[in-house]
Amino acid sequence: MRIGVFCSGGDAPGMNACLRSVVRSALSAGHEVVGIRRGYQGLLDEDFYINSDGEPLMTLRSVSGLTKFGGTMLHTSRCPQFRTEEGQKKAAAILRKCGIDALLPIGGDGTFHGAVDLARHWDGQIIGCPGTIDNDLIGTDFTIGFATAVQTAVEAVDKLRDTAESHERMFLVEVMGRHSGYIALHTALAAGAEVACIPETPTDFRQILEHLKVLKARGKQSIMVIVAEGDEEGGAEKLNQGICALGCPFSTRVVILGHLQRGGSPVTSDRILSTRLGDFAVRSLLAGHSGAMAGEVRGDLLLTPFETTYSEHKAVPPELVALLETMAE
Ligand code: ADP
Ligand code: F6P
């Protein structure tokens, strides 16, 4: 079998480890891997990884030492042309021309939407791996890159706490998560933040203010508010304006962590998750499966239809929201 592998959408730490796993698993089972560079855009441009023999095939050595590197050696992209039926038909024709039997996309919900659309025009198999820091896909407890992004955010918040304590200030720290509060909630819990503003729970300026006054009266000298970029009231700047307009008892500063969270060497759990899922995705293709994402749920590897992975909002665990409130005293 000839498998085409690519990364698509926002990069995520662990994508490289996943590529290594896909290549090694497929080659050890006697199959071929074509590395498609720059996601769906690269497929449309026929932009393939070329090995040292000048062939458009990945080798065992093409992925040597990759587990520790952030980013993706195949690059990634967002590709507006692939959203059109014309683009999808063109991609299907290229796949047929190149003799590719199966595709293995590593990406998020947009990438899987694209895979479903492509399957309308191409009869090859498609099994995906969840590569996104957002952890917003149904069918896996955690996505590749989430744990590293949280680790990066926690380290940043720990540092900000030092200066917040020194100046007796409140920091509003905005983290990524296009429509999801997962990164914010986990960061807040791990860093001991006082407040998390996430799209899954209502953000009420007056309620936050009352909480801040209580904490101030109890002798709190610094406050960390972790804001998900997708919060319904807006990002950290907007929340800062809203809270200050009501008379915040602390002087405030805003920090937006941004793309910092997408880079860096993947933490151990992301490396292991990536390696397990890449191998499982290949084995699933070889077993004849298609149209699904490889995921890990409570330690078990399983497939979930692409349509299900993005069918509804992946809820944050309510007990974690409650736990943060208990801890933020
Ligand atoms: P992610 O996969 O991380 O969610 P995007 O939302 O940017 O990232 O999606 C990656 C790519 O997948 C897009 O640039 C586009 O080419 C393709 N894609 C996204 N949504 C769709 C869709 N509804 N139909 C077809 N292709 C899509
Ligand atoms: O989906 C991953 C993500 O990092 C989101 O958390 C964020 O909103 C978005 O990508 C940023 O996208 P871009 O790289 O296009 O700025």
Image (cartoon, rainbow, N blue to C red):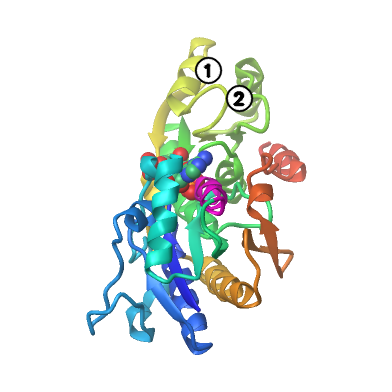
Location of residue 145 in the rendering, given as x and y in whole percent from the top left corner: 50, 58
Magenta span: chief secondary structure: helix
Q: Earlier in the sequence, mark 1 or mark 2?
A: 2
Neighbourhood count class around disc 2 (C-alpha, 10 Å): few under 14, some 14–19, many 20 upward: many
Between residue 79 and residue 245, name the one nearer to us. 79
Check if mark 1's residue and mark 2's residue have beta carbons within 8 Å.
yes
Q: Is residue 9 visible?
A: no
Residue displayed at 51% across by 45% down: 110
Q: Position of residue 135 (x, y in %)?
A: 58, 50
Count neighbours of disc 1 (C-alpha within 10 A) and say few if under 14, some if 14 to 19, many if 20 or more: some
Q: Where is 24 relative to 72, above or below? A: below
Instruction: Give the residue at mark 2.
Output: 212
In the rendered structure, which segment of residues is drawn in magenta? 109-120
Q: Classify mark 2: helix, strand or loop.
A: helix
User: Which three-letter amino acid code belongs to the residue tagged 2?
Assistant: Leu
Label 1 element class? helix
Q: In this view of the protein, can residue 246 be seen by the observer?
A: yes
Task: Name the amino acid, label 1.
Answer: Ile
Q: Nearer the viewer, residue 133 or 304?
A: 304
Q: Which mark is residue 243?
A: 1
